Image (spheres, rainbow, N blue to C red):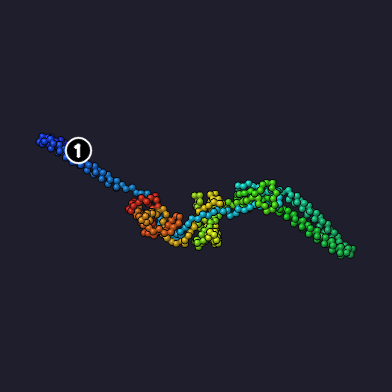
Amino acid sequence: MLKANQVNITQINTVQVNTMPVKVAHKMIKKVAIATLIAMNFMQVSFAADSVEKIKVKVVEKPVKVASVLNMPLAAKTELNATLYSRSHIPITASLNARVDYLVEPGDSVAQGDKLAGMDLLPIQLRQAEQKAQISRAKINVAYIKNELSRLQELSKTQAVSQFTLDQMRSEHDLAAADLKIAQLKLAQINEQLSRAIITAPFAGIITERLIRVGSEVNRGDILLKLLDTEHLEARLYIPIKYLAFINKGDKLSLSASDQKTLAAVTAKIPRADPRSQTFEVRLNIPKALNKHWAAGQLVSVSVPTQKATASLTVPRDALILRKSGSYVVKVNTDNTVSRLAVVVGKGNKERVAITGSLKHGDNVAIRGAERLADGDKVVIQ
């Protein structure tokens, strides 16, 4: 095209130069050049339009993540803080008056039955030995009096001994037998004290505090240590009294802390309102699997229902597109095209919200990548 135009221009130039004045020839050459440039620009625009058309044909499907619309009971919830407690955090006390010979250290982990404290056994052992000797003496006395009683009973058959003497000997025999019984009971008491001189753990746990030192003299009832049960944790929270009707024993509430989540059953509901805070106490049992992640005294977040649960169409919160004009969701159709639908948002919890709109149970809605989609767009579900 360009070469042809150039030849024509040359020919025209030659003709015009030969037959026309110079100024007229220059004007004609200028007009031909402008016409040629316009033709070239038109060709470039045509090529560009063809390229755009080809690009439009090759539309890339946009990736999205979807979730289902569910018809399910849903109650509005609020987040409250609860504190974790051990079910047992008890003082370990001395069980007799003695000197402390052994104590475990704070932070020590103990199993049920492990030795926690030991008392000086020597004074008790000496009393035990003394009492055993007293029992031996009492047995000898009983045996002697028994023989005397038998002898007098034989003599009484021949009237060689008075009835008064016989009755007196019987009384002495009964008293000696009673003394032996008392001595045996005293020995049992000493043995029981000796068994309490070694204090063992009533359950597995951690020593949290030591209040006395080895070598100290203690009295019965003095606190030696404090033992924390780390195997059985519970959450205690105080809920506004207006939500009393929405929580019952056995309900399962969602708890979260330290990137850990769980469901915990309500083990106690104490329907007594604090006069100042107007709250009531609820306790929840923590699964043992979380013992290595959570500790007594830690705060955890609890989702508490604040309304009665009613069946509603629900979508994940991530599916909502919020605009000044209203709320929308993007429905993914069976042919992988999308439709943007207006919805009315109702009550919800941390994960899902109730909606009203042109949706039904089982429909798929986009929860990732929905912001950039328009009606009719093709998508690929990831």
Q: State the image coordinates of residue 274 (x, y, percent, origin top left).
A: 55, 60
Q: Residue farthest to the front?
A: 276
Name above or below for residue 298 compared with residue 44: below
Q: Residue farthest to the left?
A: 19
Is residue 106 toward the left or the right of residue 152 in the image? left
| Front one among 160 and 60 | 60
Name above or below for residue 237 compared with residue 33: below
Mark 1: few/some/many CA within 10 Å (<14, 14-19, 20+): few
* Residue at the disc numbered 1: 2
Is residue 350 toward the left or the right of residue 167 in the image? left
What is the quadrant of residue 148 in the picture? bottom right
| Front one among 354 and 18 | 18
Q: State the image coordinates of residue 255 (x, y, percent, origin top left).
A: 50, 54
Is residue 152 toward the left or the right of residue 262 in the image? right
Q: State the image coordinates of residue 216 (x, y, percent, origin top left).
A: 69, 47
| Front one among 99 and 167 | 99
What is the quadrant of residue 146 in the picture? bottom right
Can you see residue 187?
yes
Q: Quadrant of the N terminus?
A: top left
The number of numbered discs placed on residues in the rendered structure image is 1
Q: Residue at x 69, y 53 (%)?
A: 220
Q: Residue at x 38, y 50 (%)?
A: 369
Q: For numbered disc 1, what is the local secondary structure?
A: helix
Can you see residue 195?
no
| Front one among 9 and 271 | 271
Q: Residue at x 54, y 54 (%)?
A: 83
Is residue 137 toward the left or the right of residue 239 in the image? right
Q: Amino acid at mark 1?
A: Leu
